[in-house]
Amino acid sequence: MENIKQIELTKYTKFAGCGAKLGPGTLDKALCGLKQPEYPNLIADFKTSEDAGIYRISDDIALIQTIDFFPPIVNDPYIFGQIAAANALSDVYAMGGKPITALSVVGYPKDTLDMEHLRKIMDGGLNKLIEAGAALVGGHSLDDPELKFGYAITGIIHPDKVLRNNTLKPNETLILTKPLGTGTINTALRAGKASSAAIEESMKSMAFLNKTASEIIQKYPVSACTDITGFGLLGHACEMMSGTNTGLKINFSTINLFPDTMKYISEKYIPAGTGRNKRYRMSYIGNSDNISKDILYTLFDPQTSGGLLVAVPDEFSSEILDKLKKTGHTASVIGNTTNKAERIEITT
């Protein structure tokens, strides 16, 4: 993690937090009422809040399509490229698929930022695409006063092996494969208050692919899976419960956090996205009056390239957790599913 202050990329955007992602309430308003024809081969689209779209092209193969891009959240161009790629690839892994191609999406302030930095960003992204086995086939760029970067990813999967995010079953174990806190640490970084340990641990995690975690869980009877990104742990947990007869119990004390996350929250380095997530989903928290604001801020913290949240039968949880830890994942059991429909309870 050398030269993390070589250039302050984060100055080239006015946004804070997790890439200024639109809040879930705003997106719901934008998508409300939109209809398209019923395509018989369309397995997943925008109507079900899945992590990616899926289209069947044969009895054995379906395409997975997703896109993600955002302003810089770290100051090292190479690492920013790595994180952007890992983040974009994550949706494919969350659905149990294999990424095969990528298209870059670039907004770049060419008159104010040397092109060498874009080359480093692209180099970092390509490093992660190669690790994933996804070919870079092209892209699109704009002269933009605010730097933005990411990828559109295409993956493949067997139509009968898709991992959904809203097919939970009661009385199963919840496993989270990465720590929480990237949004808060990124906010502290912009303010010049983040420690070297917090920056390095969060950057390492954000650049770490969900590839191996996805491969491990596919060997077990997973009932539901999603990746934790801009809506925060509780926001994505609410999407998992939507339309099901299940609820969740989250044990905050077992969740891994990045260094100093709670300290920065107590010092009010809180991303704007945290508040949006919290306002939209607080009604789902059954015991919110008994939970501190700082804990709720942590659980609603918008993540970049976060871990997979997986629901599995209890008898497989220890075995899965052991395999995840042996392959470098900072994973933990963070709770379980319940039969309280669309309700989350938090213990501390």
Image (cartoon, helix red, strand yellow):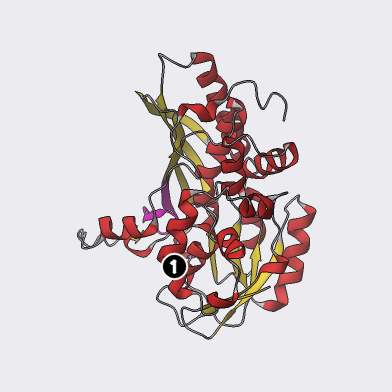
Judge whether residue 162 can be spotted in this image: no
Is residue 112 inside the magenta stretch? no
Q: Secondary structure at mark 1?
A: helix
Segment colored magenta: 51-66
Q: Give the quarter of the image for residue 317.
A: bottom right
Q: Is residue 226 above or below residue 194?
A: below
Q: Nearer the viewer, residue 324 or 24?
A: 24
Taking the spot 55% from the left edge, 79% from the top edge, the residue there is 287
Q: Is residue 191 left or right of residue 253?
A: left
Confirm whether residue 136 shows in the render.
yes
Quadrant placement of the C terminus: bottom right
For residue 63: magenta?
yes
Quarter where residue 43 is shown: bottom left
Which residue is outermost to the front?
267
Name, please, the residue furthest toward the bottom: 339
Q: In screen coordinates, is 286 left or right of 260?
A: left
**Which three-letter amino acid code belongs to the residue tagged 1?**
Arg
Find residue 39 and report its image quarter: bottom left
Local crowd size for mark 1, using a 10 Å CA cut-off: few (<14), some (14–19), many (≥20): some
Residue 10 x/y as whole percent: 53, 30
Up the image or down, 112 lies above or below 289; here it is above
| Front residue of this view, candidates 239 and 253 | 253
- In the rendered image, residue 304, in percent from the top left (x then y), is placed at 55, 46
Q: Quadrant of the N terminus?
A: top right
How far across and how far down the image is residue 338, in percent?
A: 57, 82
Tell me the residue that label 1 is attached to: 281
Task: Return the x and y of residue 134 as percentages of the image width and height.
Answer: 53, 37
128 relative to 51 in the view: left or right: right
Q: Nearer the viewer, residue 16 or 201?
A: 16
Q: Is residue 76 above or below residue 44?
A: above
Q: Is residue 56 left or right of residue 158?
A: left
